[in-house]
Structure formats: structure tokens, C-alpha cells
Amino acid sequence: MSTTGTHHPNETQIVAAPELPTIRIVREFDAPPERVFRAYTDPTLVVQWLGPRQLTMRIDRYDAHSGGSYRYVSRDDDGTEYGFHGVFHEVRFNERIVQTFTYEGFPDAVSLETVAFEDVAGRTRITCTSMMDSFETRDAMLRSGMEVGVREGYERLDELLTGQ
Amino acid sequence: MSTTGTHHPNETQIVAAPELPTIRIVREFDAPPERVFRAYTDPTLVVQWLGPRQLTMRIDRYDAHSGGSYRYVSRDDDGTEYGFHGVFHEVRFNERIVQTFTYEGFPDAVSLETVAFEDVAGRTRITCTSMMDSFETRDAMLRSGMEVGVREGYERLDELLTGQ
């Protein structure tokens, strides 16, 4: 087994597929799937890690079960609020979550997100696939700086899982 | 304005996009949007038209509002049952419905469906776009004979709207 000096096992990979309007994110965590799954589905935990560090998150509802729905609001230092909402198509215990997602600044745009939780020798690999309705929407999402929020959110989740 | 002898205004157009794993259906109805919208959202009406003629539909739940969910079962003459379920991301009165869709025979496959209702001089044009997770899934759906069920369902909806 070879490793490179700069590679970190918990590096966040973000890939835009050439043939589909998707963004695929792969990330590993130093905790078993049941703990990562709980951090994704218990709103008292979600509020502690989701999104970039400089935004404050408020959860209006987060019913993470099949057929449930969610809404949360992120607020920046100026008090500007950004709302997000969707429904949970499926929450399969410790295995996968399928949900819709709308940023309320673009209320007609809906993406479908699937998060798969995989046990990798007691650690967890998640694969998150977001499918948008067009390549234009997908590419605009990438240009919006979403990568910063994704990476910082997962760093905060690392900290939550390791009790920092 | 020119017409062809074989063209019917309520013809069902079913188009598979070359660049996206979608199926787009365009269909007009001889009724205003509020009546077509109601036929899509009131379960006592949905059960009368959705699907092909030779299947009997039973609705377990059909909460057609934003954040609601649905499940229905189609049964053939042999008593074989086919289940379908999903969640309503958005039900925008008389304008559009965005919902997820899973055929329970393939429980991991999820598509995202958007139905837009447009007023065309007192009649209604609906545009239904289904996005699957891959071109393979989309093409398998087309090969499954879904076109028959779609066309027959809309003919039954014609009959419901005209009181036959």
C-alpha cells in the first residue's frame, strides 16, 4: 500500500460528472456509520455542523424519516437569511438518505440528493450525489462557492464526531 | 394556421432528451387548469384515471400538498400488485407539482417529476418532466411499455373531465 505525503484520508472529493448534471461528493469520517448517520438525522446534531463556519443555522423542522420534511435557515453576520427546504423520500437506517433540496432564493430549482453510508473497516465513507435539472444549474451551483461550505461543514462534523 | 388531418390537439407527446436522463410528456386537455390540477391532487379523482385501463388502482395515501407523501398500488387481473410511492416536494396551486417517484419493484431507483399546468386559451397544457438517475434507468423505463399506461391514463382523464 502506498500513500502520498499530502493525502489525508478524510479529504473531501467533489466531482462534477461530464455526462450528467450531478455533483458527487465522497468523504470519509473516523467514526462508524451509525454515528455519522445519527449526525445526519438528529436535528440537535445537524445544527452543529451543516454549512460553513461563518453562518449561523436555525432549524425550523427536520423530520428525518421517510415521508418527512425539513426547513432550515442560515444567517450571516449582517443578519441576511438564506432558507432551504425539502422532503425526505427515504431515510433507510444507517444506509442511505434520499431527499429533495431547494434554496429559496431560486424557488423553482429542485435537486435530488442521495447520501449513501458505507462501513469501511469501522470508519464511514459517505457518497453524496446531487442531481440538478440542467447542466446550467449544476455549474451555477459549483460557481456559487458551495465547495467552501461543504468542506467546512465536514470539518465541523469531524470535530463533532471526535468530541472537540 | 395549418393543421394536418391526423393531428389531434390532445395528442400525447413523449420525448426522451438526448443530453439528460429525462422523459418529457406534453399533453393538452379540454378543461381549464383548475380542473386538471384538481384531477391531479384529489385522490378520489386520481384513482379514476391514473394508469392503464387493465390495472385496478388502490390508493393507500395521497396527501397532495407540499411536504406530503403518497402510495398507491396497481393490481392486474391475476392479482399481482405493483406498489409506487414518493413525496410531494411542492404542490403550487393550479401551477405545478414536484414529487419523487419510486416503483417498489426497484426500491433503490428514485426519479424526480415536475408537472407544470399552463392555461392555453381556457384549455390546459401540462408538461411533465421525469428525471432519472441514469440514462440506463431512463431507457429501461421507456422499454417497459410505460407509454401505453401514460396514453391510456390521459384518455381516461379526458373522459373524466368531459363527464363520460
Image (spheres, coloured by chain):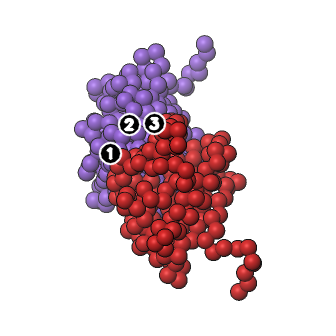
Chain colours: A red, B purple
Q: Residue at x 60, y 65 (%)?
A: A26
Quickly name the residue at label 2.
B91
Tell me the crowding category of disc 3: few under 14, some 14 to 19, or many 20 or more residues within 10 angstroms, Cα based: many
Q: Is residue A105 above or below residue B76?
A: above
Give the percent coordinates (x, y) of residue B113: 47, 44
Have a look at marks 2 and 3 and say if they share a chain.
yes
Quarter of the picture holding the N terminus of chain B: top right
Quarter of the picture holding the C terminus of chain B: top left
Quickly name the residue at label 1.
B68
B121 displayed left or right of B71? right
Instruction: Give whichever of B40, A88 is nearer the camera.
Output: A88
The amino acid on which the numbered mark 2 sits, given as a three-letter code, is: Val
Instruction: Give whichever of A105, B135 is nearer the camera.
Output: A105
Quickly name the residue at label 3.
B115
The amino acid on which the numbered mark 1 sits, given as a three-letter code, is: Gly
Q: Earlier in the sequence, mark 2 or mark 3?
A: 2
B83 displayed left or right of B141? left
SS type, badge 3 = strand
The amino acid on which the numbered mark 3 sits, given as a three-letter code, is: Val
- Asked if disc 1 and disc 2 are in contact, CB closer than 8 Å, the reply is yes
Q: Earlier in the sequence, mark 1 or mark 2?
A: 1
Give the percent coordinates (x, y) of residue B47: 28, 42
Rounded to the nearest angstrom, the CA distance separating label 1 from label 2 is 9 Å
Give the percent coordinates (x, y) of residue A28: 57, 71
Query: What is the chain letter for disc 2?
Result: B
Tell me the crowding category of disc 2: few under 14, some 14 to 19, or many 20 or more residues within 10 angstroms, Cα based: many
Q: Is residue A164 above or below residue A98?
A: below
